[in-house]
Amino acid sequence: MSNQKRKITIVGAGIMGISSALNLIRRGCDVTIIEKEIDGEPASFGNASWLSAPSITPVLTPGAIYKIPKMLFSSNGPLFLRFPGVIKILPWLLKYLTYSTAKRVNHISKHLEPLLRNSIDEHKKLAEGTNALQWIKEAPYLYLYKNKQDYLKDSFSWNIRKNYGFNLIDIQSDELHELVPGLSKEYTFAIKIENQGYIINSKKYLKDLLEGFKDLGGKIIEDEVIDIISNEKNIKAKTNNNEILSDDIVIAAGVFSDTLSKKYGANVPLQSERGYHLELRKTNIELKYPLMNGYLKLAITPKPTNGIRFAGLVEFGSLKSKPNPKAYDLLLKNAESMFPGISYGEKSEWSGHRPATIDSLPLIGKSPIDEKVFFAYGHHHIGLTAGPKTGEIVAKSILRDNNQIDLTPYKPNRY
């Protein structure tokens, strides 16, 4: 294949797969994406749609272990454990908790920051020349608290953000309620961070990126990859219906990457973290900015047709478990507690699986045992934000581009 374009197969059409594909095809490669559900709604669709550079701190921070009982048993807590599935992953969960020390959280934040930095510009660069550009919206973020004391309790995470140059603007009660109409009077303090953004319609954004990829000559195959077989000259993706030969393969299938990756040296323990969102449309409240409820750990995003998306619950259990109806009930309850007078004409619900690594860092880069295999998955809650930068890193790794950040923290065999 040395006299032809380099042939690349990408497993997965979420934001990691699309970003890798666009970066590679723009650099002259022959790229094919294989996705088992082209019109599906993966985690890249179902998240809060934030492009959030400040999200450099992981879910678990120092003291988190003492907050878990309250999260589990509180009537509005953001954490669910599903039995009996959670019993099988208890060893993983216990180890996961050990990554909440100050030293480890600082390490995680240090290496998430390069993936999230300048996310708005990275997404604009990714979407350039496609219709996806229209769905990128710039806006400040507001992190809501009932009072300043609650904000100060989160000072560990906020100090990390300050250390990476984020300017935190205090918003007092009167200004807050002007900025956020309909907000409960319980909330009297917020932090504003300028120069952030979100995706107006995440499904259409992903679709338009794929259309842009096809316009550049990219190929998309709707099928499921069941095995990856390598030899000295090339590598083969075996699907339910076909076998596709290429020079290199990128595994970017989110939580479903694990079974394909293990045989190529990926040893970072991965579990499904089921996420939920509730989207209310035709509401009597129109939001202008993305909001984070620091008390409920709830991300709130403006959507078209006076829509509002509420996301942020975490559930550990099993890939095979069905969505928990109590989660949707809780999201609605929390929405109504934040906006006591809210009404809506329509609502939709979503649930899907996020890929949660044990150390809260993704797997990015080359397989340690086969130079034709590359990884791009395991981004927890920050996949959409980190997608364009991850795709650029993967493209540079495949094309042996020396202009590259240090990938040691994301090594697939680091565990």
Image (spheres, helix red, strand yellow):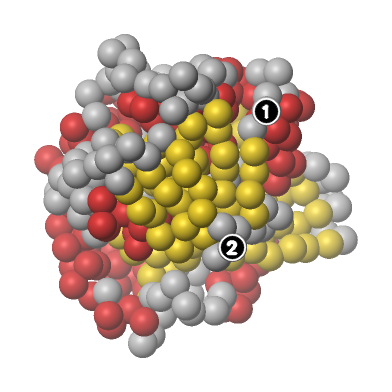
Q: Nearer the viewer, mark 1 or mark 2?
A: 2
Pick the quarter of the image with the N terminus.
Answer: top left
Q: Is residue 250 above or below residue 139?
A: below
Query: Which one is earlier in the sequence, the residue at label 1 or at label 2?
Result: 1
How would you rate the neighbour count of disc 2 (Cα within 10 Å): few for under 14, some for 14-19, many for 20 or more? few
Q: Give the number of the disc on residue 167.
A: none
Residue at the image point whose x is 57% and y is 39% from the top: 32
Amino acid type for the residue under numbered disc 1? Gly
Residue at the image point whose x is 40% and y is 37% from the top: 248
Amino acid type for the residue under numbered disc 2? Asn
Residue 134's quadrant in the figure? top right
Q: Is residue 109 left or right of residue 79?
A: left
Residue extending furthest toward the top? 403
From the viewer's side, name the closer residue of 393 and 400. Answer: 400
Q: Is residue 385 left or right of residue 160?
A: right
Q: Is residue 201 above or below residue 284?
A: above
Question: Mark 1 and mark 2: span between their CA atoms?
Answer: 22 Å
Q: Identify the secondary structure beneath mark 1.
A: loop
Q: Is residue 189 in view? A: no
Residue at the image point whose x is 24% and y is 29% from the top: 407
Q: Where is residue 255? Give x, y as percent.
A: 42, 58
The residue at which mark 2 appears reads as 241
Q: Where is residue 220? Give x, y as percent.
A: 64, 44
The residue at which mark 1 appears reads as 217
Q: Identify the secondary structure beneath mark 2.
A: loop
From the viewer's side, name the closer residue of 173 and 281. Answer: 281
Q: Where is residue 145? Give x, y as percent.
A: 47, 46
Asked if the residue under mark 2 is in contact with the one under mark 1, i.e. CB atoms within 8 Å, the reply is no
From the viewer's side, name the closer residue of 360 and 220. Answer: 220
Q: Is residue 8 left or right of residue 326?
A: left
How would you rate the neighbour count of disc 1 (Cα within 10 Å): few for under 14, some for 14-19, many for 20 or more? some
